[in-house]
Amino acid sequence: MVVAAAPVLEYPLPTPEIELMTRHFLHALEGLSRDVLAMGGAVEATVARAVRAFLDRDVRAAKAVVDGDREINLFELRIDEECLKMLALYQPTARDLRFVTATMKIINDLERVGDLAVNIAERAQVLAELPPRETPAAFVEMADRARSMLTGSLDALVRYDTARAQEVLKMDAAVDRLVASIFDELEVDMAQHADRIRPDLQILSASKNVERIADHATNVAEDVVYMVEGTIIRHRY
């Protein structure tokens, strides 16, 4: 018996229109990456300025942080619009789709970090009008760690580096311990020195905002893992 040969499937060659759309999509992806990195850099600089203004009780620098929040908000709006446009025009799939959707989540976290930096700057403005109060040493260490986490998560995003992202996730526990130690220290201080309650409360508030910055850096790192591997690790506990 003669077995008929299997039919040969012929796939049409890409049309000029498809090739043009592919080029447009790749160009859009590159532009989106640049914008996210620019937003991340602006947020990093804002956090650094806010922490320094808080430690120095620098009212002018604190006001600059508050006034500069508009730039970060505009970044988020523009990038979010770019993502929606890409989803509508190109209907990406697989890794490209994960990149676009993860980007929408990442810019939301970055915008919230900007808001938290503003909160820290506002605490600096209040503290400048209160009796002098030394900032606990643990606050400086915690702020350094939170900033390192933010830098690390953005570095992982740039390099598509899940190992770097995992390092960021491991750093969060130390920040949690530091904020707890600050709370304990200031609770004792307020009980013993009623005249320092107001400045202590401002320091407590700033400490909580720093801890939240670390949380958002963790979110970005988790989104990098999802973007690269397609694995969702949020709420893993």
Image (cartoon, rainbow, N blue to C red):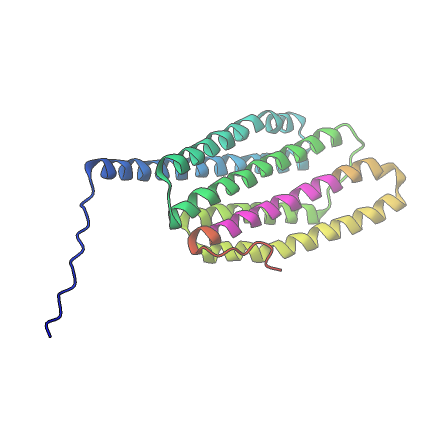
Answer with the quarter of the image where residue 135 lies.
top right
Seen from the viewer's position, the closer of residues 15 and 170 is: 15
Q: Which residue is drawn at 67% across and 34% down?
A: 119
Q: Residue 99 location, x and y as percent?
A: 42, 45
Would residue 209 be counted in the magenta stretch? yes
Q: In this view, does 51 lie above or below 145?
A: above
Q: Which span of residues is magenta-colored?
A: 204-224
Q: Main secondary structure of the magenta part?
A: helix
Seen from the viewer's position, the closer of residues 169 and 25 is: 25
Q: In this view, does 127 lie above or below 187?
A: above
Q: Residue 110 location, x and y as percent?
A: 54, 39
**Location of the N terminus (image quadrant):** bottom left
Q: Residue 82 location, x and y as percent?
A: 43, 33
Instruction: Locate residue 132 relative to residue 51 in the image: left or right.
Output: right
Instruction: Locate residue 130 relative to residue 226 in the image: left or right.
Output: right
Instruction: Locate residue 107 relative to residue 186 in the image: left or right.
Output: left
Q: Residue at x 79, y 51 (%)?
A: 184
Q: Which residue is drawn at 52% across and 42% down?
A: 105
Q: Residue 165 location, x and y as percent?
A: 50, 54
**Location of the C terminus (image quadrant):** bottom right
